[in-house]
Image: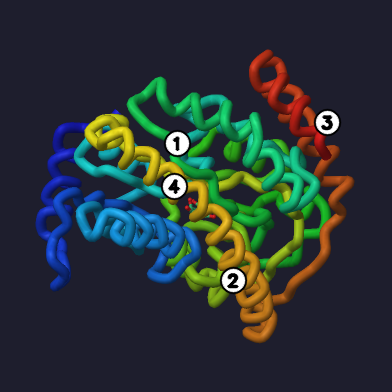
């Protein structure tokens, strides 16, 4: 739960940020993202803004505050819930604890490929998970790609789970990711995304896990020189809107917004696919040691954790539907 102080800090941060030279639209939706400018998620939300501006002749617009200007992902979710902020784009891992259904999309090895993940989130499974945001004053506008997550560290290549033993590995603020790293034999440390680069530099942590695009754009590859293709999670990204702000729009504007959000998913995927190729090439060119890992061994080590989560009948139902479509 966000303290009054943090809420106030968010509101003050928003008020103090530069607003640019453009005429202010009648309805300005502010959006947060922890990623750097031009990251595919940042561009996806800008794309929605450009559709809205075009279709409403400038009456509705979106301003994206990228690079974590509005704080950590979990804090921005609270700002959106309280209506201080209208939109935030966050990683599913940042939602796992507050919205238990979201864990199913991040479970280790639940998806076989990007195509499998996209197919699942585009259909009934994605709709069910998105509907669960309504319980806490949020509207799930879109689910975006986040690629496949792999381990990286400063010390050695990771081929099998035993290679993680003794490594202090940062995890997102999610009990599921914490349990996963523990199940694989690593030593998990939850830390906000924005604090990882300096945590690696100061050796507070030895590594972490993420997609290659984030590994590259956060510059962690400059410090962590081993990238191991464990491909353990396809946990995606969510674009969340404040229910209050959504309900304040007319029915026609809401339809425009949800259509633009749907279109932004397709737009983002094109940008994403290219950016993953570029990031992969860039880390290799920069001399990061990339290695394949024993996926069967990782899958086996993660299986008890998956089974634990499947004791929840709702998660088990969704998991079964995802696997049936593999
Ligand atoms: C990235 C995601 C970010 C951030 C990060 C993390 O893949 O795009 O939003 O949450 O992972 O590990 O915290």
Q: Please say if 171 is above or below 324.
A: below
In primary-sequence order, the first of circles 3 and 2 is: 2
According to the image, label 4 marks what residue? Answer: 90
Q: Write the residue at 31% across / 31% down.
A: 243
Cβ–Cβ under 8 Å for marks 1 and 2? no
Left or right of 159? Residue 125 is left
Secondary structure state at the residue bearing disc 1: strand
Q: Disc number at residue 324?
A: 3
In primary-sequence order, the first of circles 4 and 2 is: 4
Secondary structure state at the residue bearing disc 4: strand
Q: Write the residue at 68% across / 36% down.
A: 107
According to the image, label 1 marks what residue? Answer: 140
Single out the mark in the foreground, 1 or 4: 1
In primary-sequence order, the first of circles 1 and 4 is: 4
Cβ–Cβ under 8 Å for marks 3 and 4? no
Q: Residues within 10 Å of mark 1 (few under 14, many from 20)?
A: many
Secondary structure state at the residue bearing disc 3: helix
């Amino acid at each position: 739960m966000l303290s009054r102080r943090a809420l106030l800090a968010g509101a003050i941060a928003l008020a103090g940020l530069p607003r640019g030279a453009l005429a202010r639209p009648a309805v300005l939706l502010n959006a947060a993202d922890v990623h750097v400018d031009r990251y595919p998620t940042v561009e996806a939300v800008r794309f929605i803004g450009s559709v809205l501006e075009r279709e409403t002749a400038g009456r509705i617009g979106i301003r994206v505050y990228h690079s974590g200007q509005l704080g950590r992902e979990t804090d921005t979710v609270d700002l959106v819930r309280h209506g201080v902020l209208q939109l935030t784009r966050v990683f599913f891992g940042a939602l796992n604890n507050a919205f238990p259904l979201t864990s199913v999309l991040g479970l280790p090895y639940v998806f076989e490929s990007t195509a499998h993940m996209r197919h699942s989130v585009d259909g009934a499974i994605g709709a069910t998970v998105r509907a669960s945001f309504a319980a806490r004053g949020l509207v799930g506008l879109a689910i975006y790609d986040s690629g496949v997550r792999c381990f990286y560290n400063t010390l050695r290549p990771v081929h099998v789970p035993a290679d993680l033993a003794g490594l202090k590995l940062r995890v997102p603020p999610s009990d599921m990711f914490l349990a996963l790293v523990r199940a694989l034999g690593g030593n998990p440390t939850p830390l906000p995304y924005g604090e990882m680069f300096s945590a690696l530099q100061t050796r507070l942590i030895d590594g972490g896990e993420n997609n290659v695009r984030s590994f590259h754009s956060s510059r962690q590859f400059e410090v962590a020189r081993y990238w191991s293709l464990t491909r353990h999670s396809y946990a995606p990204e969510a674009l969340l809107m404040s229910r209050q702000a959504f309900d304040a729009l007319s029915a026609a504007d809401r339809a425009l917004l949800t259509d633009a959000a749907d279109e932004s998913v397709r737009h983002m995927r094109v940008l994403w696919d290219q950016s993953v190729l570029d990031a992969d090439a860039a880390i290799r060119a920069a001399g990061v040691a990339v290695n394949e890992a024993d996926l069967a061994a990782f899958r086996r080590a993660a299986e008890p954790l998956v089974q634990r989560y499947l004791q929840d009948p709702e998660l088990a139902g969704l998991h079964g539907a995802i696997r049936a479509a593999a």
